[in-house]
Each structure stands twice: as structure tokens, then as C-alpha cells.
Amino acid sequence: MQFWLAQVMNGLSFGALLFLLSSGLTLIFGLLRIVNIAHGSYYLLGAYVALTVAKATGQFWLAALAGAAAVGAVGIVMQRGFLARLYRQEQAQVLLTMGFSFVFADLALWIWGGDPQRIPAPSVAAGSIAVGPIFFPLYRLAVILVGALVAVFLWLLIEKTRLGAIVRAAVDDQEMARGLGINVEPILTGMFAVGAALAGFGGVMGGPFLGVYPGVDSDVLPLAFAVVIIGGLGSLKGALVGSLLVGLLDNFGKALFPELSYFTLFVPMAIVLAIKPTGLFGRA
Amino acid sequence: MSPRARLLLGVVLLAVMLALPQAVPVYFTHLIILAMIYGIVAMSLDLLLGFTGLTSFGHAAYFGVAAYAVGVLSTRLHAHSLVAMAGGVAAAVVVAMIYGLLAIRATGVYFLIITLALGMGTWGLAYRWVSITGGDNGLPGIPALNVGLPWSMRDPVNLYYFIALVFLLAVFAAYRFVVSPFGLTLRGIRESESRMRLLGYNVWLHKYIAFVVAAAFAGLAGTLYAFYNGFVAPTDLQLSASAEAVLMVILGGAGTLFGPVIGAALVVFLRNLVSAYTQRWLLILGTVFILTVIYAPRGVLGGARALWDRVRPRVRPEAPPLPAGGVAVPGGQRSDPSKG
């Protein structure tokens, strides 16, 4: 019982982290049809920038803000400067973002070195708390809380605001939205930046328990892809359900079949694809 | 090119290939071996990317599965080299038959992302399934290739000749494949799937077969690589290996079949020359990706062909459209790499 409870909590907190990562990925895909390979790099860059800021100031939340903002800025440059030129050329966009992911990985290695590091957890969330019979790290609970807050925020933003209505219009039919006089370009850039910043923020949140190291980008990227494929490309609801599913599957997979842990993720993905190629909540 | 000029070019190329390992330092022989192995990979990916219009971002999976199969068969089970090679290609084919069922139903960017994810999953298997694959440490100690000839395949020059033979056979087979009625049908699918469906072709089956054939070629390259390298590791099938294969195809020109071989040689030589001077290969590779996409989206051969088409006086009319029934046209269709 203790084992299962601990695994469920671990899975949920990892799922919350994955949601920060995959909500940006799915948002960017839904709006711009860009399969962003550099999304893992955003996670990496956000974590490293926050690490530097946290070391200099000792302020976790300031570091988190800096990490998210820096990566958001990187996203704006990539979208405006490069991806906008390759509108609807999916293959070229994938190659471009792949190139950026190599550049970012090597630059990070150059600047921050190859040793694994850890962002210190904020002092409010240090220590652990008794949940029934087990002691659970407070920080992981904080990650679940933050993930839930971000989910609620995104839902309110997309469903309840004028901006969200414009975004939904642009997802459904971009040409029609343009035809109605909506200036879509700033929306696209803005949402790309939001998606990138969310991934960067994910890197910061993951920093205290997963650590920051060269290669963390390619460790988290497949998980984020599994989430959006299971949940459905472009769907925020899908990203949420997929994140929790993948978070739990990954934890139970690691605990029960350590050797096949990575593959246990891809079996449900294959099953979903076989039954519904567009994912649980995706539209063709 | 007239048939005579083509024959002459072939003879000259063959002579160069025969003479090369005698003329260049051993270091370059190694690089040419790698260029031929990755040339087969890039060429096989071009069958999908350039000729069928399917952008696969998981092609390294089949290369890697075959290489691992060779590793397991020859180190654990002490199988004969040729048995191990056959087993490697068979493993790649089986994996492609499963993955193809999942991926071929999807089109466009969905196909891309599904192949990408399947490739990542295969990498994960190689990385974590330690008892079979050795995990991060890989599978070392693959013995030298033994094809029953009196020459030792430990010697890179002898190995060169064997791999060159396989390479030429593979190029010939791939060429026959793309100019066959089946290959022409694939190009028809690339241009317009709905039209081909209307003409009564089973589009799904054609794509599926192309997918498996491409994987078989990649698997063949993987078996050669395992024997050449003597060692297989998860990095051989990771996402960046798949992406590099796509880069080779784009760099050489998608839909030109031979272009990707040149693209592969460019990447192999660049990597080794750059690595001699700096640790920052990844930075340079990333920059090559970005520059290629922005400045040379049709690749070296594709760009050269476009230039040639512009310079050459127009004496021949445009190639006739694909006939109904998928009958091969002598000389084949002129492919348009920009639509790859």
C-alpha cells in the first residue's frame, strides 16, 4: 500500500512537470503546426538560467521567472527570425528546430559544463510531509500544485478571455481569422513565446528533483512527445490527461519493469494510435 | 546523358572506387567505408522522403535494430557472420512491419511525429534493456566479418572492398526499385494521393511496402556498420542519428537517389575533419542544419540540377505525365525534389 501510494504521488508530480512541458508543445503545434524539437532545449535552458540566477541571488522564484523569461525571449527570436520564413513547411521546420537543439545543447555544455547540478528547492517547500503512512517531499507536492495552477490559468486564458477566443479561432481556421481582420502574427509569436516559457519554467521546476545535466533535453523530449501523441496534437485537455497518464506509467514502469521502463510508455502510445490515430482528444 | 556517356561514367567511377584504398591513407579508407554505409542509409530514406513523400524521422531505428541484432547474434549466440547479417536485416524488416502498421495510417506531419516517437521508443529500449543491449555501455566485441573468403576482414582495405561491393549492389537495387512501375506509382502517390486512389491503386499498401523496403536497406547498412565498428551503442539509433539521415538526404537533394549518398559523404567527412580541430562538432552540425534549411533546401544536387535546367537549352519536351495503369516510361519521370 505504501509502495503504491508513493508511486502514485511520484507519478502525479512527474505528470505535473510533464504538463508544463507538453502544454507548450501542443499549443505551438495547434497554432503553428510546428513540431518543435527544440522544446527539450527550452527545458534545459530554463533550468540552467535559473540555476545561475538562483546561485547569484538565492531567490528560487526570481530564478524561475528569469528562466521562463529568458526562454520566452529565445522562442520569440526563433519564431520571428527563422520559423516564420518556413510557414507550413513541416519538414524544414523540424530540421531547423533540430539544428537549434544541437546548437543549444552544445552552447549549454560550453557555458555550464558537463557536471550534473541541482537547483536548490525554495525554502517554503523544503522538508517533507506525512501523507497517511508515508513521508512525502513537500517540493513534489508544490510541483503538483503549480502544475494545477498553470492548467487552470491556461484553461481560463483560452476559454474565458477575448485573447483566448482569438487563439481558438486561429487554431480552427487561420485564414478565416485573418479574413475577419484579426492580426494573427502577434498572436502566433506571443503563444510561441508562452509555450517556450512554459517549457523553460518546467525546467526550473524539475531542477530541484531531476537535476540539470547535459542530455536532460533529450531525456524529457520523448516523454513530452508521448504525451501529445497520446493526448492528441494541439489539444490542451489532451496534454493534461496525457501528462498524468505518462507520469504515472513512467513511474510504475520504472518501479515494476526497470529494464523496459522506457518502452512501457510507448506501448500505450501504440495502442492509442492503432485505435485513434489522432490521439485521445485530437482532431484530424 | 547518352547511354555511352553513362557507361563511361560508370566505368570511371568503378575504377576510382577500386583504386581508392590503394591511393589514399588508411584514415580516408575508414571515412569512405563510413560514407558508403551512411550512403545506403540516406539513399534508403530518400525512397520514403524523396520518392514517396513520407518524411520519416525515425529511420535510424532500423539501422540500429539491425546493428544490435548482429551484435546479439554474433557475440551471444556466436552465429556465422552471414547468418548474423541476414538476422539483422530480418529484425529491421520485422520492426518496420510493426511500426509501419502504426505510422502509415497517418499522413503529413502526423506521420513525421509518429515515426519520430517510435524511433525514440526504440532508442529507449536500447538504452534501458540492459540485459540484452548492454544499456549505455552498448555491445562491444563484435567479431570481424567472416564471409568465407581467405582475406581477413580486420584489414580495412579488404573490408572496404566487401562493403563497396554491397554498396554498389544496394545502389543498383535501389535504382531498379525507383524506376520500376512500383517506384513510379510511389512518385504518383507523392504527387497526388487522391488521384492515385482514384486510379485504383492501393495507396496504403504501396506506402507500407516502400516503408518496409526502405527499412530493409537501412538494416543492411546497420549490419555492415556493426561489423565495421565492432561495437553498437544507443547513440547509433538516437533521434539525432535519424535527423542526420534526413539532413544527408536534404543536403544531397531529396528525390535524386544518388544525391543523398553525396550528402552522407559530406556529413561523414565534415564530422571527422571538424572533430580533428574542435570539440564543438554539435554546434557546427546544428549550424549546418539551420543553414541548409534556409539557404539550400533543395540540397547540393538539387540546386545543381535546378541550375542545369536553367542553363541547358530546351530541346526535349517535358516528360509525359504518369500513364494510367502504372506502366514504366523509358527514362522515367523527372522528379521534383522541392515536393519531397
Image: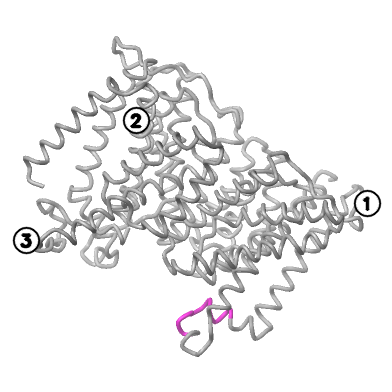
Q: Secondary structure at mark 2?
A: helix
**Visible residue check, residue B206:** no
Q: Secondary structure at mark 1?
A: strand
For disc 3, the chain is B
Up-down relation of residue B255 to residue B128 (above or below): below
Q: Which mark is residue A130?
A: 1
**Visible residue check, residue B26:** yes
Render colour scheme: one colour
Which residue sits furthest front?
B277
- Residue A46 location in percent, x, y? 70, 57
- Residue B186 location in percent, x, y? 26, 54
Mark pair 2, 1: CA separation:
63 Å
**Pointer 3 residue:** B315
Q: A106 or B54: nearer the eye?
A: A106
> Which quadrant of the figure has residue B25?
top left
Badge 1 amino acid:
Ala
- Residue B140 location in percent, x, y? 53, 22
The range drawn in magenta is A167-176
Density class for disc 2 (Cα within 10 Å; few <14, some 14-19, many ≥20) is: many
Badge 3 amino acid:
Val
Disc number lying in front (3 or 1): 3
| Dominant SS type (magenta) | helix
Quarter of the picture containing the N terminus of chain A is top right
Which residue sits furthest top?
B150
Q: Does B149 sit left or right of B333 as displayed?
A: right
Mark pair 3, 1: CA separation:
84 Å
**Pointer 2 residue:** B32
Residue drawn 45% across the image and 20% down it: B74
Q: Secondary structure at mark 3?
A: loop
